[in-house]
Amino acid sequence: MTLDIPVLFAAGATDLTPFLVLLAGIALVIISIAALRIHPFVALILAAALVGSLTNLINGSGGNPITTAISDTMKQLGNTAGGIAWIIALAAIIGLCLMESGAADRIVRGMIRAFGEKRAGYAMLASSFFLSIPVFFDTVFYLMVPLAQALAFRLGKNYVYFIVAVCMGGAITHSLVPPTPGPLIVVEALGINLGFTIIGGIALGLIPAFVGLKCGGILDSRLNIPLREGGMVKIKDLEEIVGKDDSELPSFFVSSLPVALPVLLIALASVVQEFSSPDAIGPLYSIIEVFGQKHVAMFLGALIAITLMARQKKLDKTALWKALESPLGTAGTIILITAAGGAFGGMIRQSGIGDTITTLTQGTGFSFILLAWIVAAVMKVAQGSSTTSMITTSGIMAGILATISASGATLGYDPFYLFAAIAFGAMFGSWMNDSGFWIVCKMTGFTEAETLKTWTLSVSIISLVGIVQLLIVSALFPFPFGK
Protein backbone atom coordinates (compact mmCIF):
# COMPACT_ATOMS: atom_id res chain seq x y z
CA MET A 1 0.00 0.00 0.00
CA THR A 2 1.26 3.50 -0.81
CA LEU A 3 0.35 6.36 1.51
CA ASP A 4 -0.95 9.38 -0.37
CA ILE A 5 1.03 12.30 0.93
CA PRO A 6 -0.50 15.57 1.90
CA VAL A 7 -2.15 19.39 3.86
CA LEU A 8 -0.77 20.38 7.11
CA PHE A 9 -3.92 21.36 8.93
CA ALA A 10 -6.84 19.10 8.14
CA ALA A 11 -9.86 19.21 10.42
CA GLY A 12 -10.56 16.47 12.91
CA ALA A 13 -9.97 15.33 16.44
CA THR A 14 -6.24 14.81 15.97
CA ASP A 15 -4.18 15.44 19.09
CA LEU A 16 -2.13 18.57 18.38
CA THR A 17 -0.10 18.53 21.60
CA PRO A 18 3.03 17.18 19.79
CA PHE A 19 3.03 20.45 17.82
CA LEU A 20 3.06 22.43 21.05
CA VAL A 21 5.92 20.30 22.37
CA LEU A 22 7.83 20.77 19.11
CA LEU A 23 7.25 24.54 19.15
CA ALA A 24 8.45 24.74 22.75
CA GLY A 25 11.67 22.94 21.82
CA ILE A 26 12.28 25.05 18.72
CA ALA A 27 11.53 28.26 20.65
CA LEU A 28 14.07 27.30 23.31
CA VAL A 29 16.73 26.63 20.64
CA ILE A 30 16.11 29.94 18.86
CA ILE A 31 15.96 32.03 22.05
CA SER A 32 19.01 30.32 23.55
CA ILE A 33 21.23 30.64 20.47
CA ALA A 34 20.00 33.86 18.83
CA ALA A 35 18.96 35.96 21.84
CA LEU A 36 20.89 34.63 24.86
CA ARG A 37 24.00 33.61 22.86
CA ILE A 38 24.18 30.25 24.64
CA HIS A 39 26.51 27.73 23.03
CA PRO A 40 24.59 25.55 20.53
CA PHE A 41 25.69 22.34 22.29
CA VAL A 42 24.10 23.45 25.56
CA ALA A 43 21.03 24.93 23.83
CA LEU A 44 20.31 21.72 21.90
CA ILE A 45 20.74 19.48 24.97
CA LEU A 46 18.40 21.70 27.00
CA ALA A 47 15.85 21.67 24.17
CA ALA A 48 16.07 17.87 23.89
CA ALA A 49 15.50 17.48 27.63
CA LEU A 50 12.57 19.91 27.49
CA VAL A 51 10.90 18.08 24.59
CA GLY A 52 11.42 14.74 26.34
CA SER A 53 10.08 16.03 29.66
CA LEU A 54 6.96 17.55 28.11
CA THR A 55 6.33 14.37 26.10
CA ASN A 56 6.61 12.22 29.22
CA LEU A 57 4.35 14.54 31.21
CA ILE A 58 1.67 14.57 28.50
CA ASN A 59 1.82 10.81 27.86
CA GLY A 60 1.92 9.94 31.55
CA SER A 61 5.03 7.77 31.19
CA GLY A 62 6.10 5.73 34.19
CA GLY A 63 8.78 7.10 36.48
CA ASN A 64 9.97 10.66 36.87
CA PRO A 65 9.29 12.43 33.54
CA ILE A 66 12.27 14.80 33.84
CA THR A 67 14.95 12.30 34.90
CA THR A 68 13.69 9.83 32.28
CA ALA A 69 13.92 12.55 29.62
CA ILE A 70 17.47 13.46 30.66
CA SER A 71 18.51 9.80 30.54
CA ASP A 72 16.94 9.37 27.10
CA THR A 73 18.63 12.56 25.87
CA MET A 74 22.05 11.26 26.94
CA LYS A 75 21.41 7.92 25.20
CA GLN A 76 20.48 9.73 21.99
CA LEU A 77 23.60 11.91 22.35
CA GLY A 78 25.82 8.83 22.60
CA ASN A 79 24.11 7.00 19.75
CA THR A 80 24.52 9.98 17.42
CA ALA A 81 28.14 10.59 18.39
CA GLY A 82 28.93 6.94 17.69
CA GLY A 83 27.68 7.33 14.14
CA ILE A 84 29.38 10.59 13.20
CA ALA A 85 32.40 11.30 15.46
CA TRP A 86 35.09 9.38 13.55
CA ILE A 87 33.96 10.68 10.15
CA ILE A 88 33.82 14.33 11.21
CA ALA A 89 37.24 14.09 12.88
CA LEU A 90 38.78 12.59 9.74
CA ALA A 91 37.08 15.19 7.51
CA ALA A 92 38.62 17.94 9.66
CA ILE A 93 42.07 16.34 9.31
CA ILE A 94 41.68 16.05 5.53
CA GLY A 95 40.66 19.71 5.37
CA LEU A 96 43.69 20.94 7.28
CA CYS A 97 46.10 18.75 5.31
CA LEU A 98 44.71 19.94 1.96
CA MET A 99 45.21 23.53 3.05
CA GLU A 100 48.65 23.18 4.62
CA SER A 101 50.15 20.93 1.94
CA GLY A 102 49.14 23.24 -0.91
CA ALA A 103 46.91 20.49 -2.34
CA ALA A 104 43.80 22.68 -2.24
CA ASP A 105 45.65 25.48 -4.05
CA ARG A 106 46.83 22.94 -6.64
CA ILE A 107 43.27 21.71 -7.21
CA VAL A 108 42.08 25.26 -7.88
CA ARG A 109 44.95 25.96 -10.26
CA GLY A 110 44.27 22.70 -12.07
CA MET A 111 40.60 23.62 -12.46
CA ILE A 112 41.49 27.05 -13.84
CA ARG A 113 43.91 25.46 -16.27
CA ALA A 114 41.29 22.91 -17.35
CA PHE A 115 38.49 25.44 -17.87
CA GLY A 116 40.72 28.23 -19.19
CA GLU A 117 40.95 31.77 -17.84
CA LYS A 118 37.95 32.89 -19.89
CA ARG A 119 35.84 30.38 -17.95
CA ALA A 120 37.56 31.01 -14.64
CA GLY A 121 34.18 31.38 -12.92
CA TYR A 122 33.43 27.74 -13.73
CA ALA A 123 36.83 26.79 -12.33
CA MET A 124 36.15 28.63 -9.06
CA LEU A 125 32.70 27.04 -8.83
CA ALA A 126 34.01 23.53 -9.54
CA SER A 127 36.89 23.93 -7.08
CA SER A 128 34.72 25.05 -4.16
CA PHE A 129 32.07 22.43 -5.07
CA PHE A 130 34.70 19.67 -4.94
CA LEU A 131 36.64 20.89 -1.91
CA SER A 132 33.53 21.42 0.24
CA ILE A 133 32.67 17.71 0.12
CA PRO A 134 35.03 16.83 3.00
CA VAL A 135 36.10 20.33 4.08
CA PHE A 136 33.97 22.74 6.12
CA PHE A 137 32.56 25.75 4.27
CA ASP A 138 34.44 28.40 6.25
CA THR A 139 37.75 26.59 5.66
CA VAL A 140 37.12 26.39 1.91
CA PHE A 141 36.11 30.03 1.88
CA TYR A 142 39.28 31.12 3.66
CA LEU A 143 41.27 29.32 0.96
CA MET A 144 39.22 30.31 -2.07
CA VAL A 145 38.58 34.02 -1.45
CA PRO A 146 42.25 35.05 -1.71
CA LEU A 147 42.50 33.04 -4.94
CA ALA A 148 39.34 34.70 -6.30
CA GLN A 149 40.72 38.08 -5.30
CA ALA A 150 44.02 37.31 -6.98
CA LEU A 151 42.24 36.27 -10.17
CA ALA A 152 40.09 39.42 -10.18
CA PHE A 153 43.21 41.49 -9.48
CA ARG A 154 45.03 39.96 -12.46
CA LEU A 155 42.06 40.31 -14.85
CA GLY A 156 40.92 43.67 -13.49
CA LYS A 157 37.26 42.58 -13.48
CA ASN A 158 34.64 40.02 -12.41
CA TYR A 159 35.24 40.25 -8.64
CA VAL A 160 31.58 39.67 -7.70
CA TYR A 161 31.31 36.90 -10.28
CA PHE A 162 34.24 34.97 -8.81
CA ILE A 163 33.09 35.47 -5.21
CA VAL A 164 29.56 34.26 -5.97
CA ALA A 165 31.03 31.26 -7.82
CA VAL A 166 33.03 30.32 -4.72
CA CYS A 167 30.01 30.85 -2.46
CA MET A 168 27.61 28.78 -4.54
CA GLY A 169 29.92 25.81 -5.02
CA GLY A 170 30.79 25.68 -1.33
CA ALA A 171 27.26 26.25 -0.02
CA ILE A 172 25.73 23.50 -2.16
CA THR A 173 28.04 20.65 -1.25
CA HIS A 174 28.27 21.83 2.38
CA SER A 175 24.52 21.24 2.75
CA LEU A 176 23.92 18.52 0.16
CA VAL A 177 26.86 16.11 0.21
CA PRO A 178 28.11 14.14 3.26
CA PRO A 179 30.41 13.88 5.19
CA THR A 180 29.93 17.48 6.34
CA PRO A 181 28.04 17.48 9.68
CA GLY A 182 24.56 18.63 8.54
CA PRO A 183 24.13 16.10 5.72
CA LEU A 184 25.72 13.37 7.83
CA ILE A 185 23.23 13.77 10.68
CA VAL A 186 20.28 13.80 8.26
CA VAL A 187 21.54 10.57 6.66
CA GLU A 188 21.75 9.00 10.13
CA ALA A 189 18.30 10.30 11.16
CA LEU A 190 16.50 9.17 8.01
CA GLY A 191 18.37 5.87 7.81
CA ILE A 192 19.32 6.28 4.14
CA ASN A 193 22.32 4.93 2.23
CA LEU A 194 25.40 7.15 2.54
CA GLY A 195 26.97 6.19 -0.80
CA PHE A 196 23.82 6.82 -2.83
CA THR A 197 23.31 10.07 -0.92
CA ILE A 198 26.76 11.27 -1.97
CA ILE A 199 26.07 10.33 -5.62
CA GLY A 200 22.58 11.86 -5.58
CA GLY A 201 23.67 14.97 -3.70
CA ILE A 202 26.40 15.71 -6.22
CA ALA A 203 24.01 15.11 -9.14
CA LEU A 204 21.24 17.30 -7.71
CA GLY A 205 23.74 20.05 -6.92
CA LEU A 206 24.85 20.56 -10.54
CA ILE A 207 21.87 22.54 -11.91
CA PRO A 208 21.55 24.83 -8.86
CA ALA A 209 25.32 25.42 -9.00
CA PHE A 210 25.07 26.43 -12.68
CA VAL A 211 22.13 28.74 -11.90
CA GLY A 212 24.08 30.24 -9.01
CA LEU A 213 27.02 30.95 -11.30
CA LYS A 214 24.73 32.68 -13.80
CA CYS A 215 23.33 34.77 -10.93
CA GLY A 216 26.89 35.77 -10.14
CA GLY A 217 27.40 36.95 -13.73
CA ILE A 218 24.21 39.04 -13.65
CA LEU A 219 25.06 40.55 -10.27
CA ASP A 220 28.61 41.32 -11.42
CA SER A 221 27.27 43.29 -14.39
CA ARG A 222 24.74 45.23 -12.30
CA LEU A 223 26.60 45.87 -9.06
CA ASN A 224 29.63 48.09 -9.13
CA ILE A 225 31.57 46.46 -6.27
CA PRO A 226 35.33 46.95 -6.56
CA LEU A 227 38.07 44.74 -5.16
CA ARG A 228 38.77 46.21 -1.72
CA GLU A 229 41.08 45.62 1.19
CA GLY A 230 39.27 43.08 3.34
CA GLY A 231 39.68 39.85 5.22
CA MET A 232 43.05 38.17 5.66
CA VAL A 233 44.63 39.18 2.34
CA LYS A 234 45.71 42.69 1.38
CA ILE A 235 45.82 43.81 -2.23
CA LYS A 236 49.60 44.20 -2.08
CA ASP A 237 49.85 40.48 -1.22
CA LEU A 238 47.80 39.28 -4.19
CA GLU A 239 50.69 39.47 -6.66
CA GLU A 240 52.58 36.96 -4.52
CA ILE A 241 49.61 34.54 -4.64
CA VAL A 242 49.36 34.90 -8.42
CA GLY A 243 53.07 34.36 -8.89
CA LYS A 244 53.52 31.27 -6.71
CA ASP A 245 55.28 28.51 -8.69
CA ASP A 246 53.40 25.26 -9.42
CA SER A 247 56.58 23.31 -8.68
CA GLU A 248 56.11 24.15 -5.00
CA LEU A 249 52.78 22.29 -4.97
CA PRO A 250 51.90 18.56 -5.20
CA SER A 251 50.47 17.14 -8.42
CA PHE A 252 46.79 17.56 -9.24
CA PHE A 253 46.15 13.80 -9.08
CA VAL A 254 47.74 13.34 -5.66
CA SER A 255 46.10 16.53 -4.38
CA SER A 256 42.66 15.21 -5.37
CA LEU A 257 43.06 11.74 -3.83
CA PRO A 258 42.16 12.59 -0.20
CA VAL A 259 38.77 13.86 -1.41
CA ALA A 260 38.09 11.65 -4.41
CA LEU A 261 39.15 8.27 -2.97
CA PRO A 262 36.68 8.13 -0.01
CA VAL A 263 33.84 9.38 -2.21
CA LEU A 264 34.55 6.77 -4.90
CA LEU A 265 35.01 3.90 -2.43
CA ILE A 266 31.80 4.65 -0.50
CA ALA A 267 29.83 5.10 -3.73
CA LEU A 268 31.29 1.90 -5.24
CA ALA A 269 30.40 -0.12 -2.14
CA SER A 270 26.82 1.18 -2.22
CA VAL A 271 26.42 0.27 -5.89
CA VAL A 272 27.93 -3.21 -5.43
CA GLN A 273 25.83 -3.98 -2.34
CA GLU A 274 22.65 -2.89 -4.12
CA PHE A 275 23.16 -4.46 -7.53
CA SER A 276 25.53 -7.39 -6.97
CA SER A 277 26.15 -10.24 -4.51
CA PRO A 278 29.00 -12.35 -3.07
CA ASP A 279 28.02 -15.17 -5.42
CA ALA A 280 28.39 -12.91 -8.46
CA ILE A 281 31.84 -11.43 -7.80
CA GLY A 282 33.27 -13.72 -5.11
CA PRO A 283 35.92 -12.40 -2.66
CA LEU A 284 35.92 -9.01 -4.41
CA TYR A 285 32.53 -8.33 -2.81
CA SER A 286 33.99 -8.51 0.71
CA ILE A 287 37.02 -6.42 -0.25
CA ILE A 288 34.83 -3.65 -1.70
CA GLU A 289 32.52 -3.91 1.31
CA VAL A 290 35.42 -3.35 3.75
CA PHE A 291 37.22 -0.56 1.89
CA GLY A 292 33.92 1.13 0.99
CA GLN A 293 32.72 1.16 4.60
CA LYS A 294 32.44 4.87 5.41
CA HIS A 295 34.80 4.82 8.40
CA VAL A 296 37.47 2.87 6.52
CA ALA A 297 37.16 4.96 3.34
CA MET A 298 37.49 8.23 5.23
CA PHE A 299 40.48 6.85 7.15
CA LEU A 300 42.26 6.00 3.89
CA GLY A 301 41.61 9.53 2.61
CA ALA A 302 42.97 10.99 5.86
CA LEU A 303 46.09 8.82 5.69
CA ILE A 304 46.87 10.07 2.19
CA ALA A 305 46.24 13.67 3.25
CA ILE A 306 48.47 13.35 6.34
CA THR A 307 51.26 11.76 4.29
CA LEU A 308 50.96 14.52 1.70
CA MET A 309 51.21 17.27 4.30
CA ALA A 310 54.13 15.61 6.08
CA ARG A 311 56.12 15.31 2.84
CA GLN A 312 55.31 18.77 1.53
CA LYS A 313 56.18 20.50 4.80
CA LYS A 314 58.92 18.02 5.78
CA LEU A 315 57.40 17.40 9.22
CA ASP A 316 58.77 14.88 11.72
CA LYS A 317 56.37 12.77 13.79
CA THR A 318 56.23 15.24 16.68
CA ALA A 319 55.52 18.23 14.47
CA LEU A 320 53.01 16.24 12.43
CA TRP A 321 50.86 15.20 15.38
CA LYS A 322 51.15 18.66 16.86
CA ALA A 323 49.75 20.07 13.61
CA LEU A 324 46.82 17.64 13.77
CA GLU A 325 45.74 18.86 17.22
CA SER A 326 44.06 21.92 15.70
CA PRO A 327 41.62 20.13 13.36
CA LEU A 328 40.82 17.55 16.04
CA GLY A 329 39.98 20.38 18.43
CA THR A 330 37.72 21.95 15.84
CA ALA A 331 36.15 18.58 15.08
CA GLY A 332 35.50 18.00 18.79
CA THR A 333 33.28 21.06 19.02
CA ILE A 334 31.44 20.15 15.82
CA ILE A 335 30.94 16.55 17.00
CA LEU A 336 29.44 17.77 20.28
CA ILE A 337 27.05 20.18 18.53
CA THR A 338 26.05 17.61 15.92
CA ALA A 339 25.53 14.88 18.53
CA ALA A 340 23.46 17.27 20.65
CA GLY A 341 21.41 18.00 17.56
CA GLY A 342 20.94 14.28 17.08
CA ALA A 343 19.68 14.03 20.66
CA PHE A 344 17.23 16.86 20.01
CA GLY A 345 16.05 15.18 16.82
CA GLY A 346 15.66 11.87 18.65
CA MET A 347 13.48 13.43 21.33
CA ILE A 348 11.39 15.15 18.64
CA ARG A 349 10.76 11.73 17.08
CA GLN A 350 9.63 10.38 20.47
CA SER A 351 7.15 13.26 20.87
CA GLY A 352 4.75 11.70 18.36
CA ILE A 353 5.01 14.56 15.89
CA GLY A 354 5.33 12.05 13.04
CA ASP A 355 1.98 10.46 13.88
CA THR A 356 0.30 13.87 14.15
CA ILE A 357 1.60 15.25 10.84
CA THR A 358 0.84 12.01 9.01
CA THR A 359 -2.74 12.02 10.32
CA LEU A 360 -3.29 15.68 9.53
CA THR A 361 -1.93 15.40 6.01
CA GLN A 362 -3.45 12.07 5.01
CA GLY A 363 -5.60 12.18 1.90
CA THR A 364 -4.49 15.60 0.65
CA GLY A 365 -2.02 16.49 -2.09
CA PHE A 366 0.66 18.29 -0.08
CA SER A 367 4.07 16.70 -0.61
CA PHE A 368 6.30 15.80 2.31
CA ILE A 369 9.20 16.91 0.10
CA LEU A 370 7.80 20.44 0.07
CA LEU A 371 6.99 20.22 3.78
CA ALA A 372 10.60 19.27 4.57
CA TRP A 373 11.89 22.21 2.52
CA ILE A 374 9.51 24.70 4.18
CA VAL A 375 10.36 23.58 7.74
CA ALA A 376 14.11 23.69 7.03
CA ALA A 377 13.85 27.13 5.38
CA VAL A 378 11.80 28.59 8.25
CA MET A 379 14.26 27.20 10.80
CA LYS A 380 17.19 28.57 8.80
CA VAL A 381 15.78 32.11 8.58
CA ALA A 382 14.70 32.04 12.24
CA GLN A 383 17.97 31.00 13.87
CA GLY A 384 20.68 31.18 11.19
CA SER A 385 22.46 27.84 11.43
CA SER A 386 22.08 25.46 8.49
CA THR A 387 23.18 22.51 10.61
CA THR A 388 20.63 23.23 13.36
CA SER A 389 17.95 23.68 10.70
CA MET A 390 18.81 20.32 9.12
CA ILE A 391 18.97 18.54 12.48
CA THR A 392 15.58 19.84 13.63
CA THR A 393 13.84 19.11 10.34
CA SER A 394 15.34 15.64 10.04
CA GLY A 395 13.97 14.80 13.48
CA ILE A 396 10.47 15.74 12.34
CA MET A 397 10.73 13.90 9.02
CA ALA A 398 12.25 10.80 10.67
CA GLY A 399 9.19 10.67 12.92
CA ILE A 400 6.94 10.79 9.87
CA LEU A 401 8.91 7.99 8.15
CA ALA A 402 8.64 5.85 11.29
CA THR A 403 4.86 6.35 11.37
CA ILE A 404 4.50 5.44 7.69
CA SER A 405 6.65 2.33 8.15
CA ALA A 406 4.71 1.23 11.25
CA SER A 407 1.42 1.54 9.37
CA GLY A 408 2.63 -0.83 6.65
CA ALA A 409 2.42 1.93 4.04
CA THR A 410 5.22 3.27 1.84
CA LEU A 411 6.34 6.79 1.09
CA GLY A 412 5.96 6.43 -2.67
CA TYR A 413 9.47 7.68 -3.44
CA ASP A 414 12.99 7.31 -2.11
CA PRO A 415 13.49 9.08 1.26
CA PHE A 416 16.67 10.49 -0.26
CA TYR A 417 14.41 13.21 -1.70
CA LEU A 418 13.46 14.25 1.84
CA PHE A 419 17.16 14.53 2.63
CA ALA A 420 17.69 16.75 -0.41
CA ALA A 421 14.64 18.89 0.43
CA ILE A 422 16.00 19.48 3.93
CA ALA A 423 19.42 20.38 2.50
CA PHE A 424 18.03 22.88 -0.01
CA GLY A 425 15.70 24.38 2.60
CA ALA A 426 18.62 24.92 4.98
CA MET A 427 20.31 27.11 2.35
CA PHE A 428 17.45 29.59 2.09
CA GLY A 429 17.61 33.15 3.38
CA SER A 430 21.07 33.26 4.95
CA TRP A 431 21.23 36.70 6.51
CA MET A 432 22.71 38.52 9.50
CA ASN A 433 21.94 35.81 12.08
CA ASP A 434 24.05 33.31 10.12
CA SER A 435 27.80 33.04 10.74
CA GLY A 436 28.22 32.23 7.03
CA PHE A 437 26.84 35.68 6.16
CA TRP A 438 29.54 37.38 8.22
CA ILE A 439 32.32 35.15 6.90
CA VAL A 440 31.39 36.21 3.36
CA CYS A 441 30.97 39.86 4.37
CA LYS A 442 34.27 40.25 6.22
CA MET A 443 36.44 38.09 3.97
CA THR A 444 35.35 39.77 0.74
CA GLY A 445 35.29 43.38 1.89
CA PHE A 446 31.60 43.65 0.97
CA THR A 447 29.33 45.88 3.03
CA GLU A 448 26.33 44.32 4.80
CA ALA A 449 24.01 45.63 2.07
CA GLU A 450 26.27 44.25 -0.67
CA THR A 451 26.40 40.86 1.07
CA LEU A 452 22.59 40.77 1.17
CA LYS A 453 22.46 41.60 -2.56
CA THR A 454 25.02 38.93 -3.48
CA TRP A 455 25.31 36.09 -0.96
CA THR A 456 21.78 36.13 0.51
CA LEU A 457 20.05 36.58 -2.84
CA SER A 458 22.11 33.94 -4.66
CA VAL A 459 21.87 31.26 -1.98
CA SER A 460 18.10 31.80 -1.74
CA ILE A 461 17.75 31.43 -5.51
CA ILE A 462 19.63 28.12 -5.56
CA SER A 463 17.46 26.93 -2.67
CA LEU A 464 14.31 27.66 -4.69
CA VAL A 465 15.79 26.11 -7.83
CA GLY A 466 16.68 23.07 -5.77
CA ILE A 467 13.16 22.43 -4.46
CA VAL A 468 11.59 22.93 -7.89
CA GLN A 469 14.12 20.49 -9.35
CA LEU A 470 13.35 17.99 -6.56
CA LEU A 471 9.60 18.05 -7.14
CA ILE A 472 10.15 17.37 -10.85
CA VAL A 473 12.83 14.70 -10.49
CA SER A 474 11.01 12.84 -7.69
CA ALA A 475 7.89 12.65 -9.90
CA LEU A 476 9.86 11.36 -12.90
CA PHE A 477 12.26 9.05 -11.02
CA PRO A 478 10.70 8.16 -7.64
CA PHE A 479 13.27 5.42 -6.92
CA PRO A 480 16.52 6.45 -8.64
CA PHE A 481 18.59 3.87 -6.74
CA GLY A 482 16.07 1.03 -6.94
CA LYS A 483 13.52 -0.01 -4.30
Image: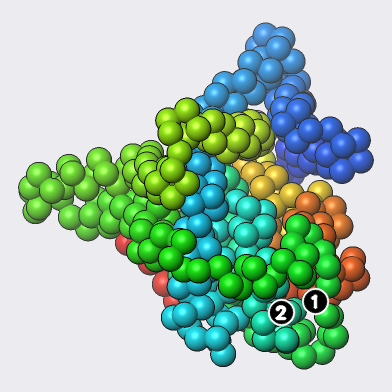
Left or right: residue 210 versus residue 318 is: right
Residue 26, visible in the rendered structure: yes
- The type of residue carrying mark 1 is Leu
**Distance between the alpha carbons at the discs numbered 1 and 2:** 7 Å
| For residue 448, above or below residue 372 | below
Q: On the image, numbered disc 2 is attached to which residue?
A: 153
- The type of residue carrying mark 2 is Phe
Label 1 crowding class (10 Å Cα cut-off): few <14, some 14-19, many 20+?
some
Q: Residue at 57% across / 21% down in the picture? A: 75
Quarter residue 119 falls in: bottom right
Q: On the image, numbered disc 1 is attached to which residue?
A: 227
SS category of the residue bearing label 2: helix
Residue 96 point in image, percent of width and height: 54, 46
Label 2 crowding class (10 Å Cα cut-off): few <14, some 14-19, many 20+?
some
For the N terminus, which image quadrant?
bottom left
Quarter residue 297 falls in: top left
